[in-house]
Image (cartoon, rainbow, N blue to C red):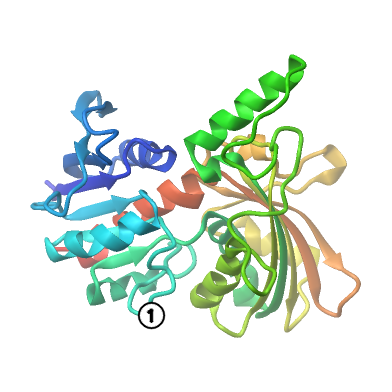
Amino acid sequence: MSRLWNVAVVGATGAVGTQMLECLEERDFPVGKIKLLASSRSAGEVLEFRGKAVQVEELTHDSFEGIDIALFSAGGARSEEFCPSAAKAGAVCIDNSSAWRMDKDVPLVVPEVNPEAIAGYKKKGIIANPNCSTIQMVVALKPLHDFGAIKRIVVSTYQAVSGTGNKAIDELRVQVGELLNGRPAVAKVYPHQIAFNCLPQIDAFCDNGYTKEEMKMVNETAKIMGSDIKVSATCVRVPVFFGHSESVNIETDKKITVQKARELLEDAPGVELVDDPAEGEYPMAINAAGEDVTLVGRIREDASVKNGLNLWVVADNVRKGAATNAVQIAEILVEKYLK
């Protein structure tokens, strides 16, 4: 009988936390004991795991005794505070926040792209999950990069409100209802109305005019795929519940034809090719929602540069962009590194 592992989910009542529970169950992860942790406001709530009711406990620095793996999705501040405590108690932390992503002693991992980086977890006992928009982009670009090294990426994202959490999902739903009934929409989560609108701002603006979300894509891509790749990003919030879409333009050091790109992506891990525009087949958010694969289509050569290619990339931001990626990391961790 294979070993079972004690797992804690931190931020268990949030959009990503509840999805982590579903992914653990769906993928039949070898869980022995499950521990659900959240803030004092959520302590006492009851969630279900494998048909059994599990009560949510308050997160404290003493919550991790006997825990082997701690899946964190409770925000950067809580990750900064509690990951060291979890690691000290012997748990390996897989953190979904931005807190540890650019720490030189913490591996930043997408299993289809750089699984070997997981080996670096021993330095701090922490593995970082990249930003959701970064994850789906590098999954799509890795097979192309291996064939003809990518020199430059220009990406525009169209990101679902679920990336902000349950409050944003509720805000979009309420705003749509209010506007359709002739009442004004009230914006609380976002700086402006999101219903029937697009907001070219995700997170705060930096001094260089880019937002923090955009700079995450720049810096994380370099850490995952190599610092020689230059990235320019524009991130936009759109009135979609689940599924981030991205328009990706790449320039490579040697030409990749459309046919070759399709061949490379056809068999790529974690990728599903949806590319028959003549039949109206291309990736859409409604098709990605609830799935773990990254959908790629609208592949076409960019005639404005020597070796340019355009792609349309779509994935479920809560699943592959967060929860599933974390569980995939945990699967490799227990298979290859933990004893």
Viewer-side residue, 124 vs 58: 58
Q: Is residue 332 visible?
A: no
Compared to 308, does 234 lie above or below?
A: above
Compared to 241, does 164 lie above or below?
A: below
Compared to 11, does 196 lie above or below?
A: above
Q: Is residue 79 visible?
A: yes
The local secondary structure at tag 1 comes to loop
Q: Is residue 91 left or right of residue 261?
A: left
Q: Which residue shows up at 68% across the image and 79% down it?
A: 148
Measured as percent of width and height from the top left, residue 136 is found at: 57, 56
Viewer-side residue, 42 vs 319: 42
Viewer-side residue, 81 vs 127: 81
Quarter of the image containing the C terminus?
bottom left
Q: Which residue in the rendered view is the most extreme toward the top?
A: 181
Q: Which residue shows up at 69% across the image and 28% down it?
A: 185
Compared to 11, does 81 lie above or below?
A: below
Label 1 neighbourhood size at 10 Å, few (<14), some (14-19), many (20+)? few
Q: Which residue is label 1 attached to?
A: 104
Q: Which residue shows up at 38% across the image and 53% down it?
A: 326
Measured as percent of width and height from the top left, residue 200 is found at: 72, 53
User: Which quadrant holds residue 175?
Assistant: top right
Q: Is residue 230 left or right of residue 79?
A: right
Q: Which residue shows up at 43% across the image and 38% down it?
A: 15
Measured as percent of width and height from the top left, residue 245 is found at: 67, 49
Residue type, label 1: Lys
Measured as percent of width and height from the top left, residue 336 is found at: 25, 65
Viewer-side residue, 305 vs 91: 91
Q: Which residue in the rendered view is the most extreme toward the left?
A: 66
